[in-house]
Amino acid sequence: MKSYRPYAPYQSYLLPPSPQEWLPENHLAYFILDLVEGLDIGEIERALQRKDPRGERSYAPRMMTALLLYGYATGVFSARRIARATVEDVAFRVLAAGEYPHFTTVNEFRAVHRVALAGLFTQVLRECQSAGLVKLGHVAIDGTKMKANASKHKAMSYDRMQKDEARLAAEAEALLARAEAVDAEEDRLYGVGQEPQDLPAELQRREGRLAKIREVRAALEREAAAARAATLREQAEGLREKAQDETRSAKQRGADATIAAKRDHQASLFDDDQDPPPAGSDDDLPRGTPPTKPDGTPKPRAQRNFTDPESRIMFRDGAAMQAYNAQIAVDEGNQIIVAAALSNNGADAGYFAPMLERIVTNCDAVPERVTADAGYFSAENVRIAEHFGCEPFLSVGKHRNDGKPEELPSNYGWQSEPRRRMRAFLATPRGRAGYARRKATVEPVFGQIRVRQRFQGVSFRGLFKNRCEWAFVCLVHNLLKLFGARRLALAA
């Protein structure tokens, strides 16, 4: 009779097995353990040391960091799923080393230390540079619309807010009148008045909805006023620069200075009730602002989301979605992300200069060439790239195939000539060859993040929180690239 290999699932071990034997030798979990040991997490440790030493001891910060890194690398983002995996998943158990943190502990660690965790991006990028994975011969910049943790159906236009506010106010008044009539009738019959908490549920729903709409409308009006003030100040700054141009007549310069002072005064009128904007490390990124009228009120189509007010309606593949604009700069050599950013402005052109600055800051070097699609083209962006010392390959749109000269709309103005020069450059063999590498460099990275890491949309609400998470997601992408390179080196 044929025999089988021994199978005794309830047999206790005479000696405890080593966790180093639970997984294959070159498993990702072991790589993360080694990597985390070399990371500087002093900021997290200092924050933990500032806590009251009494009570239950904290979990080791390197263990918690390793759990989050492995979770985001394998598509496990939920704190509940990570906590459950420390019991059920062998790799998570190896990383947790016999500890079983509660999901609230995992969530609190990620929330409290999100800035420090996002800051690990630079350290992992340095590891990639040390391994020779970053060449900076060619860097491609691109963005994708990343779904927000909010439904687009929870967004409402300013025009709709005003109409719904009036309708709900009228309905609430009618219900109150009806409730008062019922109260009077009951008082006549029973001599007992109705208690305030016994208001009809229908009236409570309408009053709650009305209060929410008024709150969101007021916030939209404040945002529109701030956006109008910023526009007026920008116009004033441009006029002051013209007023200092010695090549223009004294009359023209005097008129510009007068108008600039007027614009500053107009901007100050919108700031009377405005709090100063909070300072942050990403203030250079473009912000999505509602369309405004000259008087600083929102246009009827201006929208605001009830669930995540800082997210915006954007379009991806022709479909509207509530989203953020996630940007990356990718080095061609090994598809390492050398800069990452996220904001709520759907247009890409304003991200070009901040992304270039982040590349130089993160890598302490300037890329030789930078490519980007037509959404990033502007004469100013070409000038900025040349100022940094890198050669720009920025698409200006599709080329004509009938041999006729390019016809640009009149509103292109001063940008038309730089556009023609860039189009002519990209038509040369060198220009075609350089720009052809853009798609093969940056597009696969978005696919790897969405498919391999299974990251389809941001997890949090609010711009700041999602910026931190996007940096962490990009960090994990680089970690996986570094892991793959190490495995290839060991196999060679």
Image: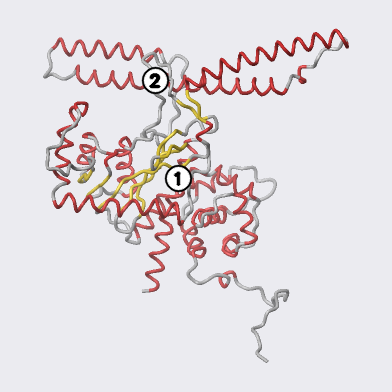
Q: Secondary structure at mark 2?
A: loop
Residue most extreme to the bottom: 1
Looking at the rendered structure, the kind of residue marked 1 is Trp
| Discs 1/2, front | 2
Q: Is residue 281 visible?
A: no
Left or right: residue 95 versus residue 16 is left
Residue 362 in picture, x, y percent from top left: 34, 47
The numbered disc on residue 470 is 1
The residue that mark 2 highlights is 292
Residue 104 in picture, x, y percent from top left: 64, 46
Among the 4 quarters of the image, the one containing residue 190:
top right
Left or right: residue 172 versus residue 118 is right
59 over 149 or under it: above or below: below
Q: Quadrant of the N terminus?
A: bottom right
331 over 325 or under it: above or below: below
Residue 21 in picture, x, y percent from top left: 57, 73
Q: Quadrant of the C terminus?
A: bottom left
Left or right: residue 274 versus residue 436 is right
Q: Residue at x 59, y 65 (%)?
A: 90
Residues at discs 1 and 2 in contact (Cβ within 8 Å): no
